[in-house]
Amino acid sequence: MGVRVSLKREQPAPTALPNFRDLFEGQFSYVWNVLKRLSVAERDLEDLAQQVFLQVHGQLASFDTRRPLRPWLFSFAYHAASNYRALARHRVELSIVAPEQADSEPGAEEQLITRQELELAELALTRVALDRRALLLLHEVEGQSMPEIAQALEIPLNTAYSRLRLARREYELAVKRLRAQRGES
Amino acid sequence: MTALETLRALGTGSDAPSESKQRVYGALVASLEAAALAGATAGATALPKPPPSLPPAPLLAGIAGSKTLAIAASIWLLGGVTGAALYGALRPSQVRVVYVDRQAPVASAAPLAKEPEPTVSAGVAPPSAASNRALVGRAALRAASSSLNLPGSQLAQERALLDLARSNAAHGEAALALEQVEQHRKQFPQGRLAEEREALGIRALLSLGRKQEAQDRAQAFRVAYPNSFLLPVIDSALSTP
């Protein structure tokens, strides 16, 4: 089974602002995959990624270094993807993020099952509404705290919890339906 | 494994394609540079609005009778005169920099003394395009120096100098570009285009192979302009072997 990446919580003490180029180097793949998981079509990913990093560049000076970087970056990607989808809602495209490489090397059969499971999870994610999907990605996939998520998405904490509950339900239902379509139990 | 457990196992995803990363970075640098240049030049010379448009000719062709034609012509002339008068009255004052090749005052010529000044005698053509560009550049420098007593045109003078430096850099005349950058530094140490000047200077130094100096200046640039749009451009130039 894939290994979950545990993200260290940033220290509350303020640190130096990250250099933009280092930030781009280190976080490009993260932003790329977030955009993909927020259903940005493959052909538009580069444009949207550029748009996100342009905004990040413009706002970098105001970044509070006591906060974790990724929810902050996520909020840019989320807003870019929301606007994009508002403009291109007639387009339907399925975009699945390739799962990370597992540290251990399981047998071929086990690996296949794992891969299928992960792809199913990615597919089920696309069935969850965007605003609720953001909660699943930040909390369940990345392990960010709810207060941090609420702050990054600029929503009240209660709303964040409420959306998370709905998101979990939507996601589990999507998984059930997909499994039923595949003839699984 | 439950559905949620699988979700938690997804991780943040694999690496993005490196070619996409490079393309995005390239586009990003170009956008930032364009934005920086646009920001530097915005407001310097706002183009005046065009005068009221004249009535189209086909309308006149369709008018029959000399009286009607005379009335139409009068209206047209009156409109034109009124428009021109309004345009002249309301048009914002425009700064115009004229480059005149004349003898430089001693004080402004001094900073250039280190560089070999090409001497051109009457009736003798400049020996090459490069030296011709050098002469034009110096003439512009002198013109910019000689009009320093016009405070309203300072930004235009700064731009004129840096435009020349940029043009020379683009034509492979890095030494001349650097000279103009230094001239700008002397004339406008706290100029509004100082940030752009420093970035240009760093790139000129790199073109001349003076990498250590370029790095030192880049370090100073980072301190002076930590949020500059031009930082990625400078970093990119420094990292190019």
Image (cartoon, rainbow, N blue to C red):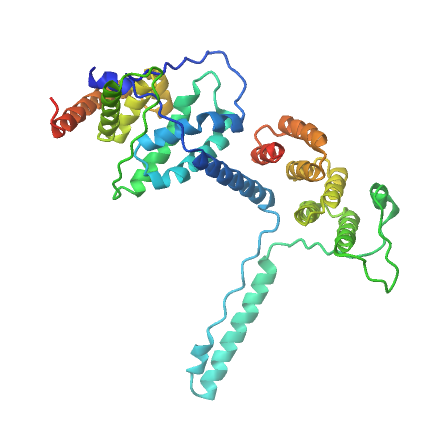
B24 sits to left or right of A118: right
Query: Residue A129's image quarter?
Result: top left
Q: Position of residue A117 (x, y in %)?
A: 23, 23
Query: Residue B6's image quarter?
Result: top left
Q: Position of residue A54 (x, y in %)?
A: 47, 35
Nearer-the-camera pick, A32 or A1: A1
Instruction: Residue at 46% x, 37% y: name it.
Output: B24
Nearer-the-camera pick, B218 or B78: B218
Q: Quadrant of the C terminus of chain B?
A: top right
Say above or below: A92 vs A72.
Answer: below
Instruction: Residue at 22% x, 26% y: name it.
Output: A120
Instruction: Residue at 52% x, 71% y: name it.
Output: B79
Is residue A157 something one can see in this rendering?
no
Residue furthest out toward the front: A108
B127 sits to left or right of A45: right
Nearer-the-camera pick, A103 or A36: A103
Q: How many numbered marks appear? A: 0
A28 sits to left or right of B233: left
Nearer-the-camera pick, B73 or B37: B37
Is residue A155 something one can see in this rendering?
yes
Instruction: Residue at 31% x, 31% y: name it.
Output: A38
Q: Position of residue B127 (x, y in %)?
A: 81, 58
Q: Quadrant of the N terminus of chain B?
A: top left
Residue furthest out toward the bottom: B65
Q: Position of residue A148 (x, y in %)?
A: 37, 18
